Image: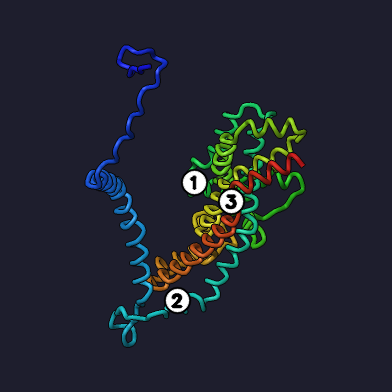
Amino acid sequence: MSTTKAGPGADSGTAAPDTPPPSPPPPSARGRVRSRTTGAAALLLTPFFVLFVLVMVVPIGYAVWLSLFSEKQSGLGFGGTETVFSGLGNYTAALGDPAFREGFVVLLGYCALYIPLMIGGALALALLLDSALARARRFFQLALFLPHAVPGIIAALIWVYLYTPQLSPVVEAMEAGGIGFDFFAPSGALPSVVNIALWEWLGYNMVIFYAALQAVDRSVLEAATVDGAGAWRTAFSIKVPLIRASVVMVALFTVIGSLQLFTEPLILNKGTGSAVTSTWTPNMYAYTAAFERNDYGLAAAASVLLALTAALLSFVVTKLSGGRKQKKAVARAAKGVTA
């Protein structure tokens, strides 16, 4: 019995011969592709690195260099000033100044009051807008975000007017209701600054949280509802763990922004009779040293110390938040609903 080979006109059910796999490109071709990819990436990243060096690395390096020198007057002060190398003298002078250390105490109180209110308030507003009961979401998003569009100086000036007795309708209404509060007193200065910062940044962070909530898989929320989870359980056991990365990012930026506190207390310090002094925060201390006392070495040293503090706190926040992975958060969220 003879067998025939399948030709071009053979039945389609006959198995076709296996085609050999394509041969890999030669090493020279792979090298050319890799070099082109590297060149394109370098071309696209070059503008970023140039700007990064110009606006970040160079100013920081110049500040460090400037902090190593100080201005000294020769003789009885009639011979002008000369720049001398002081090493770490400016750093020890800044750390030894009680005004500089008290500025960090003020920042500590500000962070303790501002950060929980900011993150908690923005997260609560985002969860409310994401809930099924929310109406007119776009209107409230815009209304809450609008204060962030106002420049910080203008916002501070607006609130100085609202804090000033005999001018402010807010103070007048509070006094009519039997509530007496001096926003410029030593006990009221810190809450006054916190209120201005909250008004500026609450809506901005709320938009970040709301955008993260919109990316949550709705099937997970539907499964939680089927399992009997209520609105509160779904919000805090499902939604919040799933947007943990956004919460950590906002917390990191809020910590860094808190250390840079400058505009609001500076406006309160100018002509309001407030308890906010010219060295109320480390940034204000550096500003006063540079532009009122013309001590640029001390100002640079204070700025470098503040930058190191910000870097250290950023590292701590990042390490504390990076200990647990996003998958573990999702697993805990699912376990919390099904439990």
Q: Residue at x 35, y 13 (%)?
A: 10
Q: Which residue is mark 3?
A: 325
Residue 102 on image: x %, y %? 57, 70
Q: Is residue 56 shown left or right of residue 261?
A: left
Crowding around mark 1 (Cα neighbors within 10 Å: few <14, some 14 to 19, many 20+) is few
- Please tell me whether residue 305 is drawn above or below residue 266 in the rendered image: below
- Between 278 and 213, the one lying in front of the other is 213
Residue 55 on image: x %, y %? 34, 56
Q: Is residue 76 visible?
A: yes
Query: Looking at the image, do the residues carrying marks 1 and 2 touch, with CB atoms under 8 Å apart?
Result: no
Residue 283 on image: x %, y %? 48, 63
Q: Which residue is mark 2?
A: 91
Query: Looking at the image, do the residues carrying marks 3 and 1 touch, with CB atoms under 8 Å apart?
Result: no
Crowding around mark 2 (Cα neighbors within 10 Å: few <14, some 14 to 19, many 20+) is many
- Between 118 and 262, the one lying in front of the other is 118
**Three-letter amino acid code at the position of disc 3:** Lys
**Three-letter amino acid code at the position of disc 1:** Ile
Q: Which residue is mark 1?
A: 154
Q: Residue at x 35, y 25 (%)?
A: 17
| Kind of element beneath mark 1 | helix
| Kind of element beneath mark 3 | loop
- Between 167 and 132, the one lying in front of the other is 132
Sooner in the amino-acid sequence: mark 3 or mark 1? 1
Q: Is residue 192 visible?
A: no
Query: Looking at the image, do the residues carrying marks 3 and 2 touch, with CB atoms under 8 Å apart?
Result: no
Q: Disc number at residue 19?
A: none
Q: Residue at x 26, y 43 (%)?
A: 33
- Between 196 and 158, the one lying in front of the other is 196
| Kind of element beneath mark 2 | helix
